[in-house]
């Protein structure tokens, strides 16, 4: 089979570099073009020196896109910019996987309320498939536009889906408490990721109004068939990468620990990147991989179900999940190119 030709739109951020790192060794893919408006003409390895001698492609402008016959493009662009690309190239033959939040929500109105931006291409919202393979595998197979999930939502959705699908928990009493590494804030310098603000520190942010709240809630509404209510609070850890999410929910009736674990085992029986752990996972257990590690337990004393969900925010929370979606769209085994072993310690 001829290799699929891939374009990566936006090369200077962490997501762009992770896509190149993963796809360089993918047996069925050829990285045909990588774009950067600010660094065009330079080598990709000039922008990301750790890839010197591995990925030395010259960066080109997005305006040169028509010169290439592409099968699929990844959009590693900021929120508000991806929608411009999708609208501009809506009639092109290539498939699109968007890693921004521009097409993850249910409507133009919800997007504009939570992102405080005007959405110029609501038709894309209607056509996009939410790229969570564990929930929407069949829809992803036939999609032309994928809205790749956010990193926090990936941990919350995978942690909660089995319980909500089985109608076992109170839908309006869901607490999602998440901690993320600094790379979640992006590569550009800003107050939130300055060394002096992150090192030897730990803080909550986005209290009550973080935009991932509505993304989580929208997908869980779909999974449960009911309206859910999520209390989501993210925190910033002084580490490079990784997300650890702890979820607290109230069961509708007394739970059995054995049956609870069996529920998750059955639900994720065909999910190659969900690992059900025997003990509480840590972020180093998934560092550098596309795994989501889950641990679920029931506290009889408080009558609460506790779920711990851990991912690498740059891989299962971004580039790796995007490659997993690409594999499904091309009819490949979804694990192809993603056989990544955790870096621990």
Image: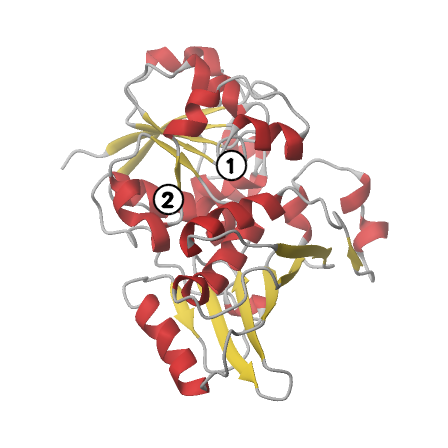
- Decide if residue 109 is on the left or right side of residue 157: right
Is 110 situated above or below 249?
above
- Residue 323 percent coordinates (x, y): 37, 44
Is 198 situated above or below 285?
above
Is 176 situated above or below 104?
below
- Residue 333 percent coordinates (x, y): 23, 51
Could you tell me which secondary element the residue under label 2 belongs to?
Answer: helix
Residue drawn at x 54%, y 61% as measured from the top left: 171
Instruction: Specify the color scheme.
Output: secondary structure
Residue at mark 1? 105
Instruction: Name the foreground residue: 19 vs 88.
Output: 88
Q: Looking at the image, tell me whether mark 2 or mark 1 is earlier in sequence order.
A: 1
Split into 4 quadrants, where in the image is the N terminus?
top left
Q: Choose top left, top right, bottom left or bottom right for residue 192.
A: top right
**Crowd tier of the residue under label 1, counting other residues whose Cα lies within 10 Å: few below 14, some 14–19, many 20 or above:** many
- Residue 73 percent coordinates (x, y): 38, 28
Split into 4 quadrants, where in the image is the C terminus?
bottom right
Could you tell me which secondary element the residue under label 1 belongs to?
Answer: loop
Q: Choose top left, top right, bottom left or bottom right for residue 271.
A: bottom left
**Distance from the alpha carbon under mark 2 to that under mark 1:** 21 Å
Frontmost of labels 2 and 1 is 1
Residue drawn at x 55%, y 70% as measured from the top left: 308
Q: From this viewpoint, is residue 54 visible?
A: no
Q: Do the CB atoms of the residues marked 2 and 1 lie less than 8 Å apart?
A: no
Q: Choose top left, top right, bottom left or bottom right for residue 90.
A: top left
Residue at mark 2? 323
Instruction: Name the foreground residue: 108 vs 206.
Output: 108
- Residue 51 percent coordinates (x, y): 50, 42
Instruction: Name the foreground residue: 340 vs 84.
Output: 84
Q: Residue 153 has which mark?
A: none
């Amino acid at each position: 089979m001829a290799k699929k030709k891939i374009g990566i739109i936006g090369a200077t951020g962490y997501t762009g570099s992770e896509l190149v790192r993963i796809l360089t060794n993918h047996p069925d893919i050829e990285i045909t073009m990588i774009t950067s408006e600010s660094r065009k003409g330079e080598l990709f390895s000039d922008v990301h020196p750790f890839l010197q001698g591995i990925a030395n492609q010259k960066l080109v402008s997005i305006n040169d896109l028509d010169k290439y016959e592409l099968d699929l493009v990844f959009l590693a662009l900021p929120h508000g910019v991806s929608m411009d690309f999708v609208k501009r190239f809506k009639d092109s033959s290539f498939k699109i996987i968007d890693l921004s939040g521009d097409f993850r929500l249910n409507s133009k109105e919800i997007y504009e309320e939570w992102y405080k931006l005007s959405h110029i291409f609501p038709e894309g919202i209607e056509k996009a498939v939410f790229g969570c393979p564990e929930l929407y595998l069949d829809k992803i197979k036939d999609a032309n536009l994928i809205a790749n999930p956010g990193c926090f939502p990936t941990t919350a959705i995978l942690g909660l889906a089995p319980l909500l699908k089985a109608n076992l928990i109170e839908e309006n009493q869901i607490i999602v408490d998440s901690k993320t590494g600094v790379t979640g804030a992006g590569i550009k310098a800003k107050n939130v990721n300055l060394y002096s603000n992150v090192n030897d520190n730990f803080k909550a942010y986005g209290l009550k109004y973080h935009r991932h709240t509505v993304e989580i809630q929208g997908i869980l509404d779909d999974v449960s068939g009911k309206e859910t209510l999520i209390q989501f609070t993210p925190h910033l850890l002084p580490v490079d990468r990784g997300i650890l999410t702890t979820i607290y929910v109230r069961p509708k009736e007394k739970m059995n620990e054995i049956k609870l674990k069996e529920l998750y085992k059955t639900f994720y029986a065909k999910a190659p990147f969900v690992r059900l752990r025997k003990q509480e996972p840590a972020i180093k257990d998934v560092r550098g991989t596309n795994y989501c590690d889950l641990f679920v337990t029931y506290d009889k004393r408080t009558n609460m179900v506790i779920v711990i969900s851990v991912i690498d925010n740059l891989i299962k929370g971004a580039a790796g999940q995007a490659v997993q979606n690409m594999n499904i769209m091309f009819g490949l085994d979804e694990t192809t190119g993603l056989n990544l072993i955790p870096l621990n310690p």
